[in-house]
Image: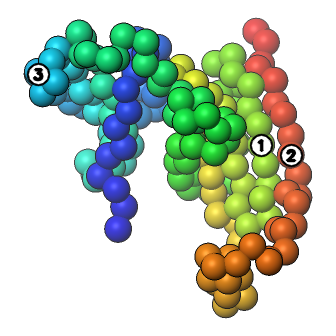
Amino acid sequence: MAYHHLAMAAADMAAIHNFYETILGFELVKVEIGPVPDGGWAKHFFYRMAGDDSCFIAFWELHGVPGCENMDTALSRAAGVPDQINHIAFNASDLENLRQRKNAWQSAGLTVLEVDHNWCRSIYTKDPNGNMVEFCVTTGAFSAQDRDLALKALTSNQVSHSEPPASVEIHRPKSD
């Protein structure tokens, strides 16, 4: 089962719109506008990620909502953890799709981190809210040993560290 939508507050909705629609290719399809129970009002913008209206990412633009004047929209920074801990990972259909997305990010002036995790390959950048955003494609298969280790790690810290990534590359923005 997949989620229907992920919703987060936005610091700059125009920048969010440019990033998620123009750069990532998600389509803005709906906005809900109304009061917030604790005061103020909000616009709730929905971006279609799948062509069949089954999966969205949504952003709240808050107006006069008490306690939100100086909100931190970077999830990891707000939680006091490193940037890569709380991140948003989207599915890439294959390695070619991942390459195309990397090129689009670089062409949009973004620095891209590319990591081959040995079982999946990922690219990362930050959105205008300061959140780490990832596109990932699974490149390996899961074994019974993988599951056994995962189950053991639930209840024990006496487990071996994973193999380091096969490769880590930083791709700078493309210059015109």
Identify the secondary structure beneath mark 2: strand
Q: In this view, does 133 lie above or below 128?
A: below
Q: Which of marks 1 and 3 is in front?
A: 3
In the image as oriented, which residue stretches furthest toward the bottom?
144
Residue at x-position 16% and y-position 24%: 38
Distance of label 2 from label 1 (alpha carbons):
6 Å
Amino acid residing under circle 1: Glu
Q: Is residue 138 above or below residue 144?
A: above
Residue 145: give x, y in percent of width and height. Answer: 72, 88
Residue at x-position 84% and y-position 34%: 170
In depth, the one of 132 and 134 nearer the eye is 132
Q: Is residue 106 visible?
A: yes
Q: Mark 2 points at which residue?
A: 168
Residue at x-position 32% and y-position 17%: 67
Q: Which mark is residue 114?
A: 1
In depth, the one of 173 and 51 nearer the eye is 173
Amino acid residing under circle 2: Val
Task: Rate crowding at label 3 as few (under 14), some (14 to 19) or many (20 or more) other CA atoms within 10 Å.
Answer: few
Residue 13: give x, y in percent of width and height. Answer: 38, 15
Q: Is residue 138 left or right of residue 42?
A: right
Residue 64: give x, y in percent of width and height. Answer: 23, 9
Residue 14: give x, y in percent of width and height. Answer: 40, 11
